[in-house]
Amino acid sequence: MIDWSWVADHLGVLAFRVLQHLELTAIAVGAGFVISFGLAIWSVRRRAVYPPIAALAGILYTIPSLAMFAALISVTGFSVLTAEIPLILYTLVILIRNIVAGFDGVPAEVVEAARGMGYTSWGRLWRVELPLAVPLIIAGLRLASVSTIGLVTITGVISDSFGGLGYFILTGYHLQFATEIYVGAVPSILLAVAVDVAFVRLQARLTPWAATRGVAAG
Amino acid sequence: MFADPKVPSSAGRDATGMCAATVEFRHVSKSYDRRDGPAAVDDLTFTVPAGSVCVLVGPSGCGKTTSLKMVNRLIEPTGGQILVDGTDVAGEEVTALRRRIGYVIQQVGLFPHRTVGENVTTVPRLLGWSREQQRERAEELLGLVGLDPARYRDRYPAQLSGGERQRVGVARALAADPPLMLMDEPFAAVDPIVRERLQNEFLRIQAELAKTILFVTHDIDEAIKMGDLVAVMQAGGHLAQFAPPDEILARPASDFVARFVGADRGLKRLSLSRIGALPLHQAVTAVAGEPVGDARQRSLADPFPFLLLIDRAGRPLGWLPDRDVPADGIVDERLAIPASPLLERETTLKDALSMMIAADVQAGIVVDPAGRVLGLLTMEALGAAGRAGAAGRAGAGAALRRAERRPAAARPPAAAP
Amino acid sequence: MGRDARRGGRLMVLLDALAAWFADPAHWAGPNGIPTRLLEHVALSGISMLIAGAIALPLGLWIGHTGRGATVAINAANLGRAIPSLALIGLAAPITAAFDPQLGFRVYPTLIAMIVLALPPILVNASAGVSEVDRDLVEAARGMGMRERQVLARVEIPIALPVILAGLRSAGVQIVATLTLGAIFGGGGLGNYLVLGIAQNDVGQVFGGVVLVAALALLVEGGFALLGRALTPVPLRAAEGGEHRGRALEGRAAG
Ligand SMILES: Nc1ncnc2c1ncn2[C@@H]1O[C@H](COP(=O)(O)OP(=O)(O)OP(=O)(O)O)[C@@H](O)[C@H]1O
Ligand SMILES: [Mg+2]
């Protein structure tokens, strides 16, 4: 069923696509994190802005990625922006929720104690609340990374120059060539699972006090 | 073993109108670690007669909750037997067993998604009572615990105060008229004033229903107040002493029990006794507004240095020091010092002592329900009573219960421990 | 100023194209007509939901009630979440095609991927919802003589209902959105407008598809919200925490 000689002939392309997959993911999660961290901090310090942000994020969530890619083609053409903008937007949905939930989860008495010890409100945010919010923030990054890896496969719909490993799945389907489908599908699953496991490890190492809970929260 | 629980309400009671079961612990043990680890409960043996309140008391972690939960088999013992009315609970079908045993926990555990009425009739519903029977029972029980059914039946637990929730919890446990109730620190989560009120209400209800009750607390004062029998437990699940409260106070079986009941156990014993039939000092009295007669001589002859002025009905008006009593003429009540404190037969000796100290007097005036003077309770008499434990020996609960049951109906008194 | 005008102009073009696409009677009939595609989408989503629910709900409730297998379930759910839907469709296609060359190539792979997509949120929310019911309540229920089934049905499920429904809702919305991928593989549903629209560079068709899918997703979301409101016992209604938490846990496997 699998044509191994085809696989052997295409290892170079495979490597290229794996790197492309990681690159598209890293850009989306990195940019998404910077934006959501800012928005989340703003929401935490100014409660009134959170509901509209959350509502907007919720609506974005209902728009299929395929639709978003398709829609953007008419605006940004076949540029990398067409791939990255939806990827970033989807990470926002996950990250903002988790970062805000992380800050919300800081026990009120801890905040109170910090205030009593004379922290300024910014000092409190950085020194006390942020470290305690880390487990949920990491959990958010984990979800965002894994789901972005999945979404990157779909960017192949925009054009052959994107898609990472999804490229093989799509062309393999059109050619009705099972080997090529598998060359895309299996590594992309492995990639997602590997990143997921890597984040679990990271989470356990960064927050030894919440090791088991962190996994459950993911 | 129990009255048929399918028959609702009072029909389940026996001929005397009582519905209570004896509970017997026989060498009951429990260790949570399978490999002979430290015992949570160690060789517990005692018997609670039908209709009495047995309080399990002891420091935190001594195995009270574990002992209680072994009765309704939320926890299975690792050794020994528990018998309810002579039948080993281990042989019972577990859900049927639990439906016949009322269960109240500290956190109350009211179902937040059900109304007060639905919460109360949980067990009747499990037993398949008709809707009508359930409604009636809910009404009866809410009334019993002092909640107006019309106001409370359709509320949700979130709409109740802590004390009200506890009442509903008790009503829910009573719903199928179980002959046995297990109560695990039922009043621990409320403030002292509400707790006191709930305790009194509990005693009132128990006076009426005479259930067998196993009651867990870590508060020795509560144990003494509520129990006919007190089982003092000690770390490791040992039974340190099993006796009526007065005996626990009078003769602690070990240093541990003595320390646990506290250095003020003499005072605590006073709280167990009521003035009741204690011999009273005959007061020297004179009726105000009437000729004084030989009052001065009588008063001087009496060791108590005051004359008590009363009105024509015999109610106390005030004190007159012996030397101020006129040799003749009319006694004038305006000269009198206010006649406090007034005590009744039901007043506990501890309360009497407290009132006498507060009023800075050597004697309290004991009056009958109509307010007429019966006699004087002096400090010496109080001291003697405290030393001898002369008045009613049983726990305050039992004493109060007997006092209240008599007028209610011509029921036989509870089996005295 | 000029830029705003240009942007406004572009939006007008878009809206015109959208209106024109919806207005064309040809788009309302035939095998690629809106009613047919909508029906296909709803049917495929419904079937996936039913199958996923039939598997994950009982399993999740059982795990939550007994506490057994919780770690295994959570890890499995995380694994399920990590698998890209497109990869799963690709993975399944050659296998199902071997059984049924027609449907096995165009429909079953997508169906399988949708079921796998829906399992984790349903499973995790059902088990977490039930296991987070106050243990004192469960003990009170047992202490009063409820059987295990009664404890689950009368106490745990009603109290966990908002969280359980949040899981179903999340699964439903994800399915409706992700099912569009099926069209890439020649399956039915609203995704066809997106795929064809991209291929034919037809803005009206792409946005028509977007509007239809988003509307359906919002309908599912709203439907579950209403269902939740109707089924949640009155005193528990204020606590919308279930939704928040249910959603905070969710990722998007691919869609
Ligand atoms: N499920 C359990 N598993 C293991 N050990 C337990 C368990 N439940 C209780 N224990 C242990 O058994 C002992 C007795 O516990 P129990 O709950 O009966 O104490 P208690 O007298 O009710 O205390 P408290 O007044 O604090 O409620 C304790 O040492 C406790 O740590
Ligand atoms: Mg306890």
Image (tube, coloured by chain):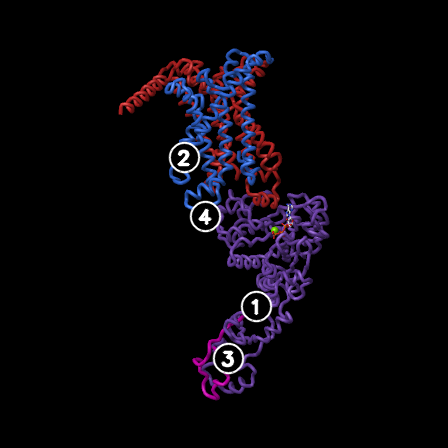
Under mark 3, the amino acid is Leu
Q: Is mark 1 within 8 Å of ligand 1?
A: no
Choose the circle earlier in sequence order: 2 or 4.
2
Stretch of the chain drawn in magenta: B318-343
Tell me, what hue is chain A?
blue
Q: Amino acid at mark 4?
A: Glu
Q: Secondary structure at mark 1?
A: helix
Q: CA distance from mark 1 to mark 3?
A: 24 Å
Q: CA distance from mark 2 to mark 1?
A: 66 Å
Which residue in the protein does label 3 denote?
A: B308
- The image position of residue C190, as x and y in percent, is 44, 19
> Which percent across, then down, holds residue A13?
52, 15
In the rendered view, tell whether residue A202 sits above or below residue B27: above
The mark closer to the camera, 4 or 1, is: 4
Q: Secondary structure at mark 2?
A: helix
- Asked if the stretch drawn in magenta spans residue A93, the answer is no
- Residue at which label 1 appears: B350
Counting every numbered tag in the picture gives: 4
- Residues at discs 4 and 1 both on one chain: no
Q: What is the three-letter code of the residue carrying label 1? A: Lys
- The residue beneath circle 2 is A39
Chain coloured red: which letter?
A: C
4 and 3 marks on the same chain:
no
Q: Can residue B387 be seen in this snapshot?
A: yes
Which chain did the image draw in purple?
B
Q: Chain of mark 2?
A: A
Mark 2 is on which residue type?
A: Leu
Which one is closest to the eye, mark 1 or mark 3? 1
Disc 4 to disc 3: CB gap under 8 Å? no
Q: Nearer the viewer, residue B72 or C166?
A: C166
Q: Which residue is mark 4?
A: A112
